[in-house]
Image: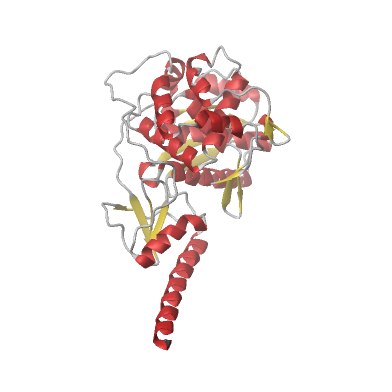
Amino acid sequence: MKGAWSEWKEAIFKACLVVFSVLLFLFFDGREFWFTQIQPQLTNMLSNQKTELNSAPVVSEQKFKQPSSVQSTNGDTFDHQTSLRQFGRCASQQAEGIKYRVENGIYTWVDERGITNYSDKKPSFAAKHYQPERNRALDFFDLNISGPNITDQFKNTLSAKLNAVFRGYTSIVGLDAMQKVTLRIKVLPNRREYERVVKSYGGNPKGNVGLYLGRYNLALVEQRNHHATMQTAVHEAVHAINQAVIGYTPRWLNEGLAGYFQTVKVTMQVGTVAPNQARLHRGYITGRVLSPYELINAESKWKSYNSELMYKSSWATIHFLMSTTTGRLSLKKLMLQEQTERCRALSNRESQALLRAHYPNIVDRFASFIQSPVEPQRL
C-alpha cells in the first residue's frame, strides 16, 4: 500500500513540476494565455494520449473558393476590389507549415485549429523552427510610427495594442497561416495636412480620418484627440494585417475585423476587446442591424446604403462570431478560404455557403446576440 502511495506521490510531484515550469516560463516570457488553453496539452504530455477538445460539430471540408486565373469583377465585390487594386497589392504566398519555438526546454506552437500547444518534445509533424524576439508579437510585425506631434508614450501604447491584436488574430487563423506585416503609420497633425497628404498619394480624404495604402505599406491617420487617433491607427493597421495574411476580402469582413479590433485594451500584457460604446446604449446594440446573410448580400450596396448601418453591422457580425467556439471556427474557415486565393475575394454565394456549413443556426443565434448585452472578449 505504501509502495503504491509513493508511486502516486512521485507522479503527482512530476506533474506539478511540469505545470509549474510551463507557467513560470510563460510568466517571464510575457506571453498571454488561458489556462484552459494549455490544460489539454499538459494532459497529453503526461498521459501520452490525445485529448479531444470540445468544439463545434465537425463538417466535411468543401472547396468554396475556386481558383481563377482572371481577376473577378462580379458585382458582389467590385467596389471594394477597385479600391484595393488602386492602393493595394496581392501576392500568392505558400504557407510555410506550422512554426514552433523552444525556450528552456519547452516547445510552443499553434496547431491547425488555432490552439496553442506546449510540450517538452518537438512537434512530430513537419515544422519550422522559429524564434521570435522577446516581447514582440511573434516578431511578425515590422512597425514604424511617425508624426510631428506623436510622443513616445503614444508609440509604446499603440505598439502594445497592435501586439495584442496580432496575437488575437493569430488565435483565429493559427500561427502557420500568419505572414509578416510591414507597416508605416504616419499621423498627420491636422485635417488640412491630412487631406493634402492623402491627395498626394492619389487618395480621396472625403468622409474619412484614416486611409491604408497597401502599395506603400502606409497608413495615414488624421490626428484628433488621443482616444480617437489611437482607434483609427489600430483600425488601419488591421487592414494591413488583413491584406498581408488573407489578401482581398469582402468589405464587410475587412471593415468588421478592423472595427472589432480597434477597441482593444491592454492591461498587464492582457489584451481585451471592449464593446464599441459608440454603437451601444447601456450595453445593448440599438437600432437596425443587418443579419450576417443580409450583410453579405449588401456587399455591392455600401455606397447606396447608410454607411453607419454597414459599419455597425460588420462590427456586430465579427463580435458575434468571436463570442463562441462555433463562431470562431466559422470565422477561421472563412478567413482561411480567403487565403487560398489572395487576389480574389469570396463571392456572396461562397461566403454564405461556408457559414451555412459551419454555423447552420447562425440566424437564430445572431438574433439572440443582438438582444443581449455585448460583453468584452479576451484575446
Residue extending furthest bottom? 2
Q: Is residue 77 visible?
A: yes
Image: 44 above or below 302: below
Q: Which residue shows up at 46% across the image and 60% down it?
A: 39
Q: Nearer the viewer, residue 91 or 37?
A: 37
Q: Is residue 235 visible?
A: no
Point out residue 117 in the picture as x, y percentages from the top left corner. Answer: 40, 56
Q: Quadrant of residue 174?
A: top left
Q: Nearer the viewer, residue 181 or 357?
A: 357
Q: Nearer the viewer, residue 170 or 353?
A: 353
Point out residue 25 in the picture as x, y percentages from the top left corner. Answer: 47, 65
Point out residue 270 in the picture as x, y percentages from the top left corner. Answer: 57, 52
Residue extending furthest front? 1
Residue extending furthest right? 282
Q: Which quadrant is home to the N terminus?
A: bottom left
Image: 5 above or below 40: below
Q: Quadrant of residue 278?
A: top right
Q: Which residue shows up at 40% across the image and 36% down it?
A: 333
Image: 135 above or below 350: below
Point out residue 68 in the picture as x, y percentages from the top left corner. Answer: 28, 21
Q: Nearer the viewer, residue 317 or 27?
A: 317
